[in-house]
Amino acid sequence: MTTTPESAINDTRKAELLSTTVEHIDIRTFDARPIVDAMAKMSFTSRDLARATDIYNQMLADRDCTIFLVVAGSTSAGGCMDLYAELVRSNMVDGIIATGASIVDMDFFEGLGHKHYQALEVPDDNTLRSLLIDRIYDTYIDEEDLQNVDHTIAEIADALEPKPYSSRAFIREMGKYLVEHGKKDNSLVKLAYEHDVPIFCPAFVDSSAGFGLVKHQVDAMKAGRPYMVLDAIADFRELTDIKIKAGVTGLLMIGGGVPKNFVQDTVVCAEILGHDDVQVHKYAVQITVADVRDGACSSSTLQEAASWGKVNTAIEQMVFAEAGSVMPLLASDAWHRGHRKGQEPRRWAKLFENAAANQG
């Protein structure tokens, strides 16, 4: 009697669990305008979403408005990845502030050809660990694929001149890498590189990028050579520079936390730098499931942020909903109304390339 090796059993079990990929929604394939229009005549979260969608459309219709997409949480892994990519491709956002996980563990991860998987069942998490499967609620990631991302990040860092980089500058190198070696055209990081849309991750190393950059630094130290470093101050300075030059700005925020507070703080930072005429963010939408019982709302509510001189309370809307269930409606509505069609892209990433050229 022969027995099946445990490794083969584990491989079979892992294949079973990673058998159904997450399919990202395509906002071009359905027109959400009728349902959003109908929701505007309802109450509760439905009406909130309709008003938030209207505010986003106001941002798009305002020819002077620079729009920041602000992303925290796991909606990219959960099926909104192509949605965000389409906003870049269609010139519907001008800058991105996000968590490192959204950019690295999710988008760059799929840009390298890896997938997220639906958890059709959730066994004991210790079992998942033994199979090298990571879990995000009801979504799986193959840990071995994620480690490939870690090593790729280290490879990119190794190839750079050893000097300080903002997260924006490093993510731009990631986009360039995907243009040359990527496996997915519809990657936010890749499209942002191609369309000169800057991406900022104020907590960049809180992701797989952190593991790769630590490896880069440790390997360089062992070899006695210099290494690149991330400059968090440059992140703040660069984003504030965009805010100063942009004038009118709008925020489309999914989740909250560090990205949300970071982009709002640019107004205060500009004032500290002597720009007393800087405008608060004129438009603001936040989609979140956080609340204020802990003294915040995954960073301050939009109304509260007005007391700090960050946002305009006249054109803002909080939507208390799981973003993956409402963002497809908001984005599809705005895409089909097409307020930005024919408008010249702002290409804010060029601002820093031109500055570097002038310094050189």
Image (cartoon, rainbow, N blue to C red):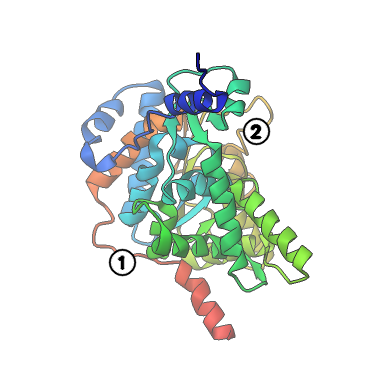
The quadrant holding residue 147 is top right
Residue 146 at x, y percent in the picture = 54, 43
Amino acid beneath label 1: Glu
Q: Position of residue 175 (x, y in %)?
A: 46, 61
- Seen from the viewer's position, the closer of residues 255 and 46 is 255
Q: Residue 39 is drawn in which quadrant?
A: top left
Q: Give the labeled residue for mark 2.
A: 296
| Whether residue 317 can be seen here | no
Where is residue 322? Give x, y as percent.
46, 28
Q: Amino acid at mark 2?
A: Ala
Q: Nearer the viewer, mark 2 or mark 1?
A: 1
- Classify mark 1: helix, strand or loop: loop
Q: Quadrant of the C terminus?
A: bottom right
Q: Which residue is mark 1?
A: 344
Q: Earlier in the sequence, mark 2 or mark 1?
A: 2
Q: Residue at x 41, y 21 (%)?
A: 44
Q: Is residue 53 rendered to the left or right of residue 160?
A: left
